[in-house]
Image: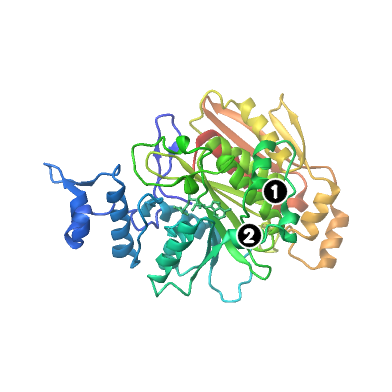
Amino acid sequence: MGGGRKRRRDGSEAPSIHPRNRYAAAAPDFAALAELYPSFRPFVSVSERGRASVDFTDFSATRELTRVLLLHDHGVNWWIPDGQLCPTVPNRSNYIHWIEDLLSSNLIPPISSSSGRVRGFDIGTGANCIYPLLGASLLGWSFVGSDVTDVALEWAKKNVENNPHLTELIEIRNANAVSLSSESEAIVREPIGENVLEPAEDVAMQKPPVLVGVVKESESFDFCMCNPPFFESIEEAGLNRKTSCGGTAEEMVCPGGELAFVTHIIEDSVSLKNSFRWFTSMVGRKANLKLLMSKARKAGASVVKTTEFVQGQTARWGLAWSFIAPRNKVLRSSTPAKNHYSFMLQGLRREHSAFQVLKSTEAFFLASKLSCKIDTLSFSVDVTLSDEQTEAAILHGDDYAGSLEESSAKLQSVVKGVSFRITVFEQIPGTLLIKGSLLNKALSGTFSSLFSELEDTLRMECLSKTL
Ligand SMILES: C[S@@+](CC[C@H](N)C(=O)[O-])C[C@H]1O[C@@H](n2cnc3c(N)ncnc32)[C@H](O)[C@@H]1O
């Protein structure tokens, strides 16, 4: 997922605009847009060399640019009142295309949808309603967009109604209109994991509903997405003076910041695991991303993926998780099972020594609730699935594509004990080779998907690379 990448000064790969983004080949042509849209003209200045530019520290200029890009390139009529959060169209499109990648990847099987149309849930759609408008106009997806403030709900509805070709596709829902005392709300408020940020979880408990109680019982969605209120205070929100994208306290701030908000989504996702194929959220801090990945795993997610979005001056990540068992990757009669996998980590800094990576590998399997034994002499980690985990992988997972009888017969023949071994080799300083060997052949599907997740996790921790 992602296109060709540039290297940062520290050797890690910088994220790049999604290859299917409308602006991947060429950035918006301000001069041409100013010719076509007189209302945009006052916001465009042309340098002596003839280069047209827009002052991104001017809210009115940013808003007018968004308006003309949505109109010119997407056929969408759009407006927001002064001060509301103003989205940048190319940046927001990257999140939509990443979800498109997740949906089309073979990682997990599709859910059956009655209409055949992709259906998404945008948590906190804002007055700008940007994700439903982009998803519906670019890809024909349908959406429920939720919010809690009067201004967001009023303007999101206006933005939908002003586009009659999209009104059938987008429903705006007031998350506060659901009863907080509903039974479903009580079901979800069981914190996940032990001791990972209890204060944030406590704060999340007092917040308005996010998914549970807002999603109706009979509903199912291909994905949810969210650009959460990132900050704990409006002072923290006001730190980026290089752009003026507006944003009121209600939009940008929530008690506990993004960590509490996304924790709330993860907690809700446990109760709604069968109602969504993918749960996703944007995350603004790398330290939070790591914590949230671990929370999703502790909550029982079977797949956790991340990406880094190109987002101007500020870094932003995408986090996705699912409870659906990963698809069968091997063990079809025509596909021989693969017993060895490997990948390289290059351009590592000193703190990412072979020992540290070995410890991170151990932490990854422990977070996935697997038992493992680290050997610091041979630089290896042996991973063992319990009998129950092995049974679940074979009978309910996708490690075997045969009938129930065949699966049971296979179960009898499974050799119990160490399932696979991960070894870390230092090739040259700054380059590590990670090898995985399957010792219990019955678990090749589980092994291949866990190894691919380990690769994603180590790359994210060590290299800041899109996964
Ligand atoms: C950072 S803004 C994102 C707006 C828009 N999606 C965007 O990307 O520009 C966060 C939004 O979440 C909304 N919000 C806060 N708590 C919420 C909740 N419990 N349920 C739904 N929306 C919520 C806020 O009102 C705000 O509009």
User: How far from the left and from the top, in percent, is residue 151?
Assistant: 45, 57
- The secondary structure type at the circle numbered 2 is loop
Numbered circles on residues, count: 2
Tell me the residue that label 2 is attached to. 108
Can residue 449 be seen by looking at this rendering? no
Q: Disc 1, disc 2: CB below 8 Å?
A: no
Of tags 1 and 2, the one toward the viewer is 2
Q: Is residue 448 above or below residue 285?
A: below
Q: Is residue 142 above or below residue 391?
A: below
- The secondary structure type at the circle numbered 1 is helix
Q: Which mark is residue 447?
A: 1
Direction from residue 40 to residue 91 in the image, left or right: right
Can residue 116 be seen by looking at this rendering? yes
Q: Residue at 45% of width from left, 70% of height from top? A: 140
Q: Earlier in the sequence, mark 1 or mark 2?
A: 2
Question: What is the crowding at mark 2: few (fewer than 14 residues within 10 Å), some, or many (at least 20)?
Answer: many
Query: Does the closest atom of ligand 1 sit within 8 Å of the Cβ of label 2?
Result: no
User: How far from the left and from the top, in percent, is residue 264?
Assistant: 64, 48
The chosen color scheme is rainbow
What is the CA distance from the residue labelled 1 to the residue labelled 2? Answer: 15 Å
Indicate the amino acid at tag 2: Ile
Name the residue at the right extreme. Answer: 412
User: How far from the left and from the top, in percent, is residue 57?
Assistant: 30, 42
Indicate the amino acid at tag 1: Phe
Direction from residue 398 to residue 454 in the image, left or right: left
Q: Which mark is residue 240?
A: none
Residue 22 image-quadrant placement: bottom left
Q: Residue at 62% of width from left, 43% of height from top? A: 293
